Amino acid sequence: MKKIVRVIPLLTGLAGVSALCASSLFAPLPQHVDFDKEKAMLGKKLYLDPKLSKDGTVACINCHVLQDGSGVDHLATSTGIKGQKGPVNAPTVYNAVYNFVQFWDGRAKDLQDQAGGPVENPLEMGDNFPDVSQKLKNDPQYVSAFEKVYGGKITKETITDAIAEFEKALVTPNSRFDQFLRGDKEALSKSEKEGFELFQSKGCVSCHNGVNLGGNLYQKAGVFEKFPQTDNFTGRYAVTGDEKDKYFVKVPTLRNISRTAPYFHHGKTPDLRTAVVQMGYYQLGISLSLDEADKIVAFLKTLEGEVPEIAK
């Protein structure tokens, strides 16, 4: 069943910040993530390898950069083989394991399902798994690695399983907000706490909550005002064919949001302050002052976490 807007009792005042933290609306990211290291290292090799694309020019990392802690390419829409442009902005791969579905339209049920999509998308990597498997079978290093991890099976199933295991490890823990949630009251400044208060009292928390501050429900892009859409972008409708799903998208995580410009599925909003003001207008039906927006941005910057070692 589709979730639209949840009505959540909001506490105002800085005293309410601590109360809300204890209410389980939010949770810190785990500081340690369990994953199969051998699978993940094979998945990392695949993630970095343009061999998965038809012409050998595009790898996963082209659209989902790791080194800067963003997990995105900072383009409005990503570039695939032959210079082709995709229709929507690339979501971050960081902390994607905590999303309840993958892609803006939720067409992939999990990380493994998602990993297969770009490989076969004609605008992205434009290949097919029988050909990809054969290319890997011609590479002695891959033959050895797949023998060790998967008993020699080099298939769509094992390729996507390895990539998903690597992506499972791409968690960015120990942000200052996480430290605050774990009890360090000095982890946030006064203005950042005020931003957190506004984040709650203005209604942002209705969609952005949980461990990922998002990624756990669908919401219509444009609740109170019509949201600027990309050409032919219909959100969930493209998957379900149900008119009620038009323009509904997976709510994005706000983790590391200050690192992932440009914003929204159209990738046309260049900075975070503008994105916050636009969210107030389109999603909440309110006009945020620049001072309010700046305080919310200050809070959002506390969501920057640590880049995991495996991503370096």
Image: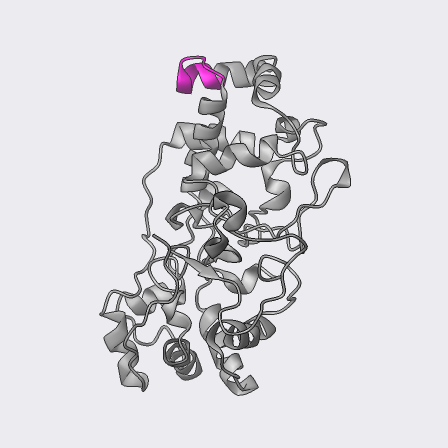
Q: Quadrant of residue 290?
A: bottom right
Q: Is residue 104 visible?
A: no
Q: Is residue 99 visible?
A: yes
Q: Is residue 286 above or below residue 98?
A: below
Residue at 68% in and 38% down: 123
Residue at 44% in and 74% down: 299
Q: Could you say where residue 4 lies in the image, as x and y percent from the top left? A: 39, 63
Residue at 54% in and 19% down: 142
Q: Quadrant of residue 17?
A: bottom left
Q: Quadrant of residue 208?
A: bottom left
The magenta-colored residue range is 145-154
Which residue appears farthest toward the front when viewing the image? 243
Q: Could you say where residue 80 lies in the image, as x and y percent from the top left? A: 69, 39
Q: Could you say where residue 280 lies in the image, as x and y percent from the top left? A: 51, 76
Q: Is residue 145 above or below residue 253?
A: above
Picture colour scheme: one colour
Based on the picture, tell me whether residue 274 belongs to the magenta stretch.
no
Based on the picture, tell me whether residue 149 belongs to the magenta stretch.
yes
Q: Is residue 131 above or below residue 198?
A: above
Residue nearest the viewer, comparing 212 with 311? 212
Residue at 65% in and 29% down: 53
Q: Could you say where residue 64 lies in the image, as x and y percent from the top left? A: 58, 46
Question: Horizontal placement of 229 versus 292: left or right?
Answer: right
